[in-house]
Image: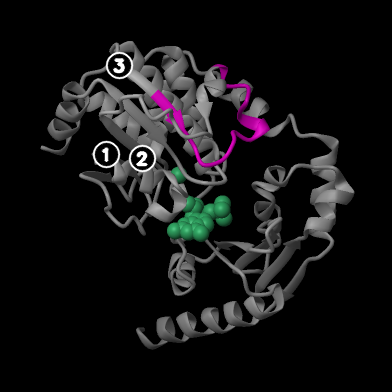
Amino acid sequence: MLFQDINNFINENQSFLITSHIEPDGDAIGSELSMAIQLEKMSKRVFIINPEPVPKRYRFLRRWKDIEIKKPRQNIRIDASIFLDVGNTKRVSWIFDFVKKKGIPILNIDHHVSNSLYGDINYVDKEASSTSECIFDIFKALGIKLNGEICECIATGIITDTGRFSFKNTSEKTFRVCAELSCCGVDFSSLSNYIYNKRSIESIRLLSFVLSTIKVIEGIAFVQLTQRMIKESGAGEEESEGFVNYVLAIGDIKSAVFFREKSNGEIRVSLRSKDETINVNRIASIFNGGGHSQAAGFRSFKSMKELELEILIAFQNIETKRDCSY
Ligand code: 5GP
Ligand code: MN
């Protein structure tokens, strides 16, 4: 039924706006490009419009330049929109208002537990490793045969959202999907090299600054990135993506918190959990954020010091609740 609705949505419309979230990651870019390439193969007109530019590390994907960050011209006809990997409408900045004002219908394809079901059609698979995996499932259900380039984009989303197949969201099905992608010619080794082993020396310097701030309180590791570190390292802000995963290498911590100071003073907070019983999505939602049980985030204009204290209390509270439920 849902697949039939998606099929109709694609068939009945001719021009599409595709979008994804701020601070785009590999799943955002991979799912957008795979959807765009397929729609173009079906002779549809496609505009990929994001709130923020494509990070350098994903610019090896041939079609990355098709992703724009400015408003489409007034006279451009857009029949329908597809929101990919977008848990809630705040995550796409001005694009949700733009689409709503024009009365453009939304197909919401996502895998976040916290998805607020804002679409006219909502395909939200919380079991999927990534939105890219959802796209694979949809194409398969619709009988679409994938080309090598689409497979590579889907694989990029899966590799990055599963932390190279190491996070809890990596299921037996994820491996089955990847086996099929591999059969289609995806070279996982070379793809991982493009994504992870082409960092700038500046970003490694930034990583060293960030790691030097580490402190562990009550089993939670805190690290921070300031605007000053960005200036001193010469790295771009988006090059700090994935830094929090280095912190998770410490054996006896249960969670990690990464504070990133943005140029407007706002703090972006990334939460990670190593302990299956600690659901960081619940912590993020206390601060009006969201995500997944093991990886979530929010943003705030409070100071890092204040946030640290509030986060510690939030962790204590959910742990107390968990202990009581035994
Ligand atoms: P990251 O820490 O890598 O930015 O994000 C981890 C997960 O949490 C991602 O799935 C992301 O979509 C979600 N997330 C991060 N920041 C926010 C936020 O401000 N709001 C919501 N709703 N989700 C977020
Ligand atoms: Mn994702």
Judge from the rendering whether residue 116 lies leftward or rightward of residue 169; answer left or right.
left
Q: Where is residue 64 shown, x and y percent of the image? A: 55, 23
Rendered location of residue 242, percent (x, y): 65, 48
Mark 3 and 2 residues: CB-CB less than 8 Å, in contact? Answer: no
Q: Which residue is at 52% across, 66% downward?
A: 275
Extreme residue in the right direction: 232
304 or 272: nearer the eye?
A: 304
Q: CA distance from mark 3 to mark 2?
A: 17 Å
- Choose the circle earlier in sequence order: 3 or 2: 3
Q: Residue furthest left?
A: 1
Left-right relation of 195 to 232:
left
Work out which quarter of the rendered image holds the N terminus and state it: top left
Colour option used: one colour
Q: Can residue 79 be seen by looking at this rendering?
A: yes
How far is the residue under mark 1 from the one under mark 2? 6 Å
Quarter that holds the C terminus = bottom left
The residue range painted magenta reads 47-62
What residue is rendered at 35% in x and 25% in y? Answer: 75
Q: Above or below — where is 200 with respect to 23?
A: above
What amino acid does circle 1 point to?
A: Leu
Q: Which mark is residue 44?
A: 3
The relative height of residue 282 versus residue 129 in the rendered view (above or below) is: below
| SS for dot 3 | loop
Disc 1 vs disc 2: Cβ atoms closer than 8 Å? yes
The residue that mark 2 highlights is 83
On residue 107, the disc is 1
Crowding around mark 3 (Cα neighbors within 10 Å: few <14, some 14 to 19, many 20+) is some
